[in-house]
Image (cartoon, helix red, strand yellow):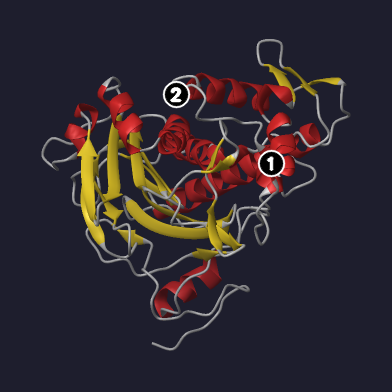
Amino acid sequence: MPSSALHGCPESTGMETSAPRFAGRSRPLQCDLPSPTPPPELCMNRLLPFLVALLLLGCGTWGEGGGPAWIDRKAEAMDATLEMSLEAPTLAAAVNASQAALNAVGAADALLSTKRPDSRVSELNAGTVGATVGLDSVLCRVLAEVDRDAREVPGAFDMVIGSLVDVWNLDGDGRVPSVVELEAARRASGNGGMQLDLERCVAQRLAAAARLEPWGFMKGYSLRAARDSLLAHGVHSAQLKFGQQVVVFGPTEAGGPWRLAIPSLEDNREEVFTLWLSDGSASTSSQSGRFVRAAGQAIGHILDPRTGTPTPGWGSLTVVAADPLRADVLSTALFVLGPDSAYAWAERHNDVGVLILDRRDGAVRFQYNEGLRPALDSATAAPIR
């Protein structure tokens, strides 16, 4: 099939999955989107009957009728790819709901991104040292939830860790700081760098290098916002993938739970473990997915706030929870603890599922807690509560 571009969308490579589709049929149309903000246009494979319909009806304004429809959409956001597969009562409803979900991700970016000078977090990070400032009400609520979840794993998760991200230059090419530089960055992190009073919704920066860094919860919050938007728009079932995290609700087109592949530590294209979810979120943390190199060493993006140094790349850890935000925070915090301490924690907290892949003595050890058992078999997969 010849490739073509529509409304500035990228050329087809012939490798895309196809979408949307009507229930019971293969997926005839593909949608690749440039970004959630500004609202992206719908683009599709050059299948003549559907293209003619688009030209006649306009992108995203499909007529009513035809019964339930599934669509797939994909967009780049927050340095990652967001993929959605969803079912709604009609094709038009599915397209409109997916657009609303993308807009919800855009709103999350406007709230939390440190790469946008106009975001609420960037405004907080640019505040005058010593001045007490009021927090945006939505931001305050999100930070309070993150703080609550982080307290479940004391010391292993810190929101005010931007000074450490900067001293290791994790947003750039990476660098290894001196002992003096690292100690200064540590003093500017946590409560020593910024005081957050989340009951009164006020904050005070105490050090010029202090910076709130949402990397450990931004995708989880964004996925929750997108999921809630889909539900509000009448979507029956959906799977949303964002980097190393996924959210699902409702049954697949075949009527069963969603199949989630856990990749090998050596090759993320190789599946080594399978989870089944009908409702909930799975977040995987590891150092293999994102790192920089400096002074001859690989520097992972997950930092231990207790030491200010990158966490060793010992393997991967997946958390399954009802709330995507909680899953994101806990997977990061437990990875920082290391496999043994993380497993000890997981045995005491069976309200979430925890899967640990630990590279040790030339082999990979698999460990999981009782909370994960419902997700191990497609016949027993039940909503995580």
In the displayed structure, does residue 305 sit left or right of residue 269? Answer: right
Q: Earlier in the sequence, mark 1 or mark 2?
A: 2
Does residue 197 sit above or below 29 in this rendering? above
Q: x, y percentage for residue 165?
A: 66, 45
Q: Position of residue 282 (x, y in %)?
A: 35, 40
Residue highlighted by disc 2: 153
Above or below — where is 273 with respect to 11? above
Mark 1 or mark 2, whichever is nearer to me:
1
> Is residue 136 visible to us here?
no
Q: How crowded is mark 2: few (under 14 residues within 10 Å), some or many (20 or more)?
A: some
Q: Residue 182 carries which label?
A: 1
What is the secondary structure assignment of the residue under circle 1?
helix
For residue 98, side relative to residue 259 (left or right): right
Lateral position of residue 9 relative to residue 129, left or right: left
Out of 361 and 55, give the one closest to the viewer.
361
Q: Which residue is at a point 66% across and 50% down the rendered structure image?
A: 168
Using the image, determine if residue 371 lies above or below residue 180: above
Q: Can residue 304 be seen by looking at this rendering?
A: yes
Q: Do the residues labelled 1 and 2 touch (CB within 8 Å)?
A: no
Q: Inspect the image, locate mark 2, and give the three-letter code of the amino acid beneath it.
A: Val
Give the residue at x 71% y 44%.
Answer: 114
Most extreme residue toward the front is 179
Q: Where is residue 160 in the image (x, y as percent from the top left)?
A: 66, 31
Question: Image quadrant for the C terminus?
Answer: top left
The percent position of residue 174, horizontal first and vertical second, equals 65, 58
